């Protein structure tokens, strides 16, 4: 028997034992009734669904967001800048209801063609600068205010490596594990096993690194920590997808040490409340337009 024939025999055996419940059609078509938490808002096409301009407040920096981990990153950065005394970082944070489709308004799509939160407009430039993708917003603010990104080229590169690690890794946690474990209308072993494995691998990457480093880029708190903390910090505290026990999150002791340390920061405590409309009412702040709103 040739090697090729071996492969054929293997794949025949798998097909026989596990007949597929779903056979993909030759051409995929949009089934609006497919179920799941996001069925009402996710579409296979981009662009606006309705005409509506974005509200603009008094400050140069306008944030349009929601207190999901991707939104929290940016609010934390702005609050950290204010904590350091950068009055130019004053901002308005507008609530975007992604479950109602606010991200598909004409004004929102002009600011972020990808229709996801968060997005920021900087009205101190002429014309105003749009910045979409949370990692790009963190980098923009770090460069503009000269904070939370080390000057030393080696440390700066380390911070950027971890920043981009988060942007590339979290979709496996959120869009992969979280979606199939918590949101999918039907629990399927294959995707849950696959993404639980990857999520635990990512936690182990962080845990090994944080065993010998205080922060992600070394001794200094940076935008890498701000990007990673809202996702993986929440995960190791059992706050994401009700999956704490399932993923044995208590075993990642170094990630938990780092998580607790960052949670103590006053700016983090304020930032995590911005555009939050769920949970304990004391932790909510639908919109933020001034420091007095907290
Ligand atoms: N890579 C993007 C991801 C942003 C993202 O996925 N945002 C979600 C909420 S966490 C969203 O806006 N979802 C609305 C939708 O999918 O329509 C970023 O970091 O800014």
Image (cartoon, helix red, strand yellow):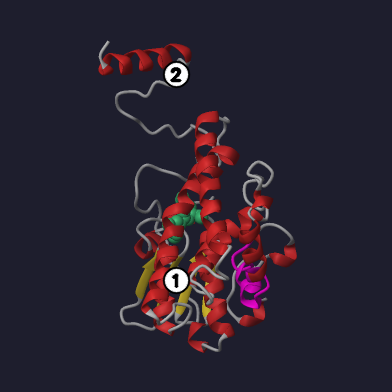
Q: Indicate the quadrant containing the N terminus: top left, top right, bottom left or bottom right.
A: top left
Task: Identify which residue, 49 or 282, lies in the foreground.
Answer: 282
CA separation, marks 2 and 1?
44 Å
Q: Residues within 10 Å of mark 1 (few under 14, many from 20)?
A: many
- Considering only vertical position in the picture, is 25 above or below 110? above
Residue occupying the point 39% across, 20% down? 23
Graded by Cα atoms within 10 Å as few (under 14), some (14 to 19) or many (20 or more), the crowding at tag 2 reads few
Q: Earlier in the sequence, mark 2 or mark 1?
A: 2
Q: Nearer the viewer, residue 212 or 43?
A: 212
Asked if the magenta segment contains residue 45, the reply would be no
Q: Which residues are magenta?
A: 262-276
Residue 286 found in image quarter: bottom right
Numbered disc 2: secondary structure: loop
Q: Which mark is residue 20?
A: 2
Residue annotated with mark 1: 138
Query: Where does residue 4 sit, x and y in percent of width and height?
Result: 26, 18
Relative to 71, does residue 182 appear above or below in the rendering?
A: above
Task: Report x, y in % for residue 198.
Answer: 50, 44
């Amino acid at each position: 028997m040739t090697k090729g024939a071996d492969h054929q025999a293997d794949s025949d055996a798998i097909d026989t034992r596990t007949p597929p419940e779903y056979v993909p059609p030759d051409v995929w078509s949009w089934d609006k009734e497919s179920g799941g938490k996001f069925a009402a808002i996710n579409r296979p096409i981009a662009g606006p669904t309705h005409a509506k301009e974005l509200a603009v407040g008094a400050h140069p920096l306008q944030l349009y967001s929601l207190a999901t981990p991707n939104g929290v990153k940016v609010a934390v950065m702005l609050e950290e800048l204010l904590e350091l005394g950068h009055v130019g970082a004053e901002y308005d944070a507008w609530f975007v209801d992604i479950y109602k489709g606010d991200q598909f308004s004409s004004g929102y799509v002009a600011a972020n063609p990808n229709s996801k939160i968060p997005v920021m407009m900087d009205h101190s430039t002429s014309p105003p600068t749009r910045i979409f993708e949370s990692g790009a917003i963190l980098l923009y603010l770090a460069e503009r205010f000269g904070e939370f990104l080390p000057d030393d080229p080696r440390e700066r590169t380390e911070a950027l490596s971890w920043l981009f690690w988060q942007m590339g890794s979290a979709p496996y946690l959120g869009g992969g594990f979280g979606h199939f474990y918590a949101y999918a209308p039907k629990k399927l072993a294959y995707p849950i096993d696959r993404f639980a494995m990857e999520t635990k691998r990512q936690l182990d990457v962080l845990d090994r690194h944080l065993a010998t480093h205080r922060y992600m880029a070394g001794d200094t708190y940076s935008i890498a920590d701000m990007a990673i903390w809202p996702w993986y910090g929440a995960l190791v505290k059992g706050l994401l997808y009700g999956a704490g026990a399932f993923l044995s999150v208590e075993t990642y002791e170094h990630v938990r040490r780092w998580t607790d340390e960052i949670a103590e920061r006053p700016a983090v405590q304020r930032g995590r409340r911005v555009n939050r409309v769920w949970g304990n009412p004391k932790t909510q702040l639908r919109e933020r337009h001034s420091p007095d709103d907290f």
